[in-house]
């Protein structure tokens, strides 16, 4: 019962669509109608509202961290892993938006912070380096997420590494359209309003 409850709580937290809520509260457009149609921070940035994009990133990360820390505090470390999975799936497939959510990068970071924060620093360092060189947010996320499970395994976090191997695979699946655009040279760069 405890793992199931942890999953449900994590899912409900993860399914809160902060990108949509914050842009609408600020009088902006429905973020699903612009750019990639995604509800995450990268697409919110395409509205030209950097503050809203930053707030979306922080809130989306926080819901992942909150799910993990709540489960760790009130249940067990294993429940925290399950809650992290729930939060990630909730963001990708929110029940409130007909199961059409974001691509999961911010929540991925948030769950990582809650479970083993030094690995979150590694992820962000890789993301910043790749994004700075390439100007592709998607490429940075793909490379950082591919390396994160290995980093966790190397530092002696095998159970967390196993979870993030799954999360990374899901993140890559959610970025399949970005991967296709990267391969054909049509992917929008950071700071542009294209998809």
Image (tube, rainbow, N blue to C red):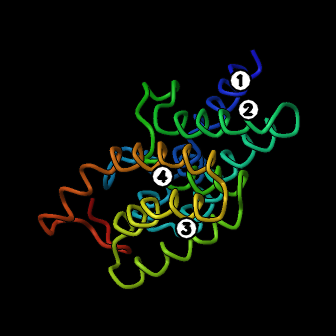
Q: Earlier in the sequence, mark 1 or mark 4?
A: 1
Mark 4 or mark 2, which is nearer to you?
A: 2
Please give the count of numbered marks on the rendered protein: 4
Q: CA distance from mark 3 to mark 4?
A: 18 Å
Q: Which residue is mark 2?
A: 79
Q: At numbered mark 2, what does the secondary structure look like: helix, strand or loop?
A: helix
Residue 38, horizontal then vertical, whole percent? 39, 48
**Which numbered marker is on residue 3?**
1
Q: Earlier in the sequence, mark 3 or mark 4?
A: 4
**Which numbered marker is on residue 123?**
3
Q: At numbered mark 3, what does the secondary structure look like: helix, strand or loop?
A: helix
Does residue 30 appear in this view?
Answer: yes
Please rate how many residues cluster around mark 1, counting C-alpha atoms within 10 Å: few if below 14, some from 14 to 19, many from 20. Answer: some
What residue is shown at x 35% (from left), y 78% (from top)? 135
Mark 3 or mark 4, which is nearer to you?
A: 3
Q: Nearer the viewer, residue 95 or 146?
A: 146
Q: Nearer the viewer, residue 21 or 115?
A: 115
Residue 164, horizontal then vertical, whole percent? 53, 49
Please rate how many residues cluster around mark 4, counting C-alpha atoms within 10 Å: few if below 14, some from 14 to 19, many from 20. Answer: many
Q: At numbered mark 4, what does the secondary structure look like: helix, strand or loop?
A: loop
What residue is shown at x 53% (from left), y 70% (from top)? 50
Q: CA distance from mark 3 to mark 2?
A: 23 Å
Q: Earlier in the sequence, mark 3 or mark 1?
A: 1
Quadrant including the N terminus: top right
Q: Is residue 115 left or right of residue 27?
A: right
Q: Which residue is mark 4?
A: 40
Q: Are marks 2 and 1 in contact (CB under 8 Å)?
A: yes
Q: CA distance from mark 3 to mark 1?
A: 27 Å
């Amino acid at each position: 019962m405890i793992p199931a409850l942890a999953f449900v709580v994590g899912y409900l937290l993860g399914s809160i669509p902060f990108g949509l809520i914050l842009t609408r509260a600020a009088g902006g457009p429905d973020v699903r109608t612009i750019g990639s149609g995604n509800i995450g921070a990268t697409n919110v940035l395409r509205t030209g509202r950097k503050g809203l994009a930053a707030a979306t990133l922080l809130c989306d990360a926080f819901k992942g961290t909150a799910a993990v820390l709540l489960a760790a505090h009130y249940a067990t470390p294993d429940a925290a892993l399950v809650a992290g999975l729930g939060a990630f799936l909730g963001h990708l497939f929110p029940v409130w938006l007909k199961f059409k959510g974001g691509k999961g990068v911010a929540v991925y970071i948030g769950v990582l912070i809650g479970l083993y924060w030094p690995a979150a620093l590694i992820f962000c360092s890789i993301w910043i380096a790749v994004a700075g060189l390439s100007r592709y947010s998607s490429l940075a996320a793909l490379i950082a997420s591919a390396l994160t499970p290995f980093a966790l395994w190397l530092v002696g976090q095998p159970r967390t590494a196993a979870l993030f191997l799954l999360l990374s695979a899901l993140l890559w699946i959610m970025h399949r359209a970005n991967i296709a655009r990267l391969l054909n040279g049509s992917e929008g760069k950071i700071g542009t309003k294209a998809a």
